Image: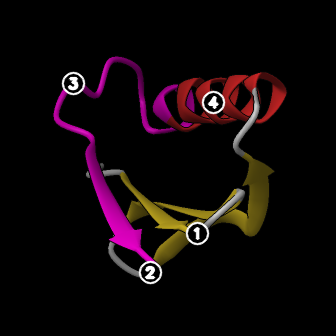
């Protein structure tokens, strides 16, 4: 698998969507607030995606889409 995490970063919160492989979304997209709890939930989500993709995916690609 080749997991990808997409982040749409806006002021105050970000939208997150993960794909385990091309055309294979992992769960529904969700929002996180730019506070400690939100960033902690993002870290837990990243670990969950990594485990679902078969373990240590050091090559996981993260795309940042910045909204200005």
Residue 62: percent from the left, percent from the top? 31, 51
Which one is earlier in the sequence, the residue at label 4 or at label 3? 4
Question: Where does label 3 land, which residue?
Answer: 58
- The disc placed on residue 35 is none
Which one is earlier in the sequence, the residue at label 1 or at label 2? 1
Residue 58 located left or right of residue 55: left
Which one is earlier in the sequence, the residue at label 2 or at label 4? 4
Q: Nearer the viewer, mark 1 or mark 4?
A: 1
Q: Which residue is at a point 67% across and 31% down the rendered structure image?
A: 39
Q: Which residue is at a point 28% across and 28% down the rendered structure image?
A: 57
Q: Report, in whole angstroms, how far the alpha carbon at label 1 lies from the one at label 4.
A: 24 Å
Which one is earlier in the sequence, the residue at label 1 or at label 4? 1
Q: Range of the magenta residues?
A: 50-68
* In front of the other: 10 or 22: 10
Name the residue at the top extreme: 56
Helix or strand or loop: what does disc 2 sit on? loop
Helix or strand or loop: what does disc 3 sit on? loop
Question: Where does label 2 land, which residue?
Answer: 68
**Is residue 66 found inside the magenta-colored segment of the image?**
yes
Q: Report, in whole angstroms, how far the alpha carbon at label 3 lies from the one at label 2.
A: 30 Å
Q: Which residue is at a point 33% across and 74% down the rendered structure image?
A: 22
Residue 12: percent from the left, percent from the top? 71, 57
Question: Where does label 4 land, which residue?
Answer: 48
Q: Which residue is at a point 70% across and 43% down the rendered structure image?
A: 34
Question: Where does label 1 land, which residue?
Answer: 10
Name the residue at the right extreme: 37
Q: Report, in whole angstroms, how far the alpha carbon at label 4 lies from the one at label 3.
A: 14 Å
Colour treatment of the image? secondary structure
């Amino acid at each position: 698998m080749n997991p990808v995490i997409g982040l749409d970063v806006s002021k105050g919160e970000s939208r997150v969507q993960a794909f385990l492989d091309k055309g294979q979304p992992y769960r529904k997209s969700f929002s996180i607030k730019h506070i400690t709890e939100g960033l902690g939930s993002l870290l837990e989500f990243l670990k969950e995606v990594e485990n679902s993709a078969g373990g240590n995916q050091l090559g996981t690609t993260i795309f940042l889409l910045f909204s200005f």
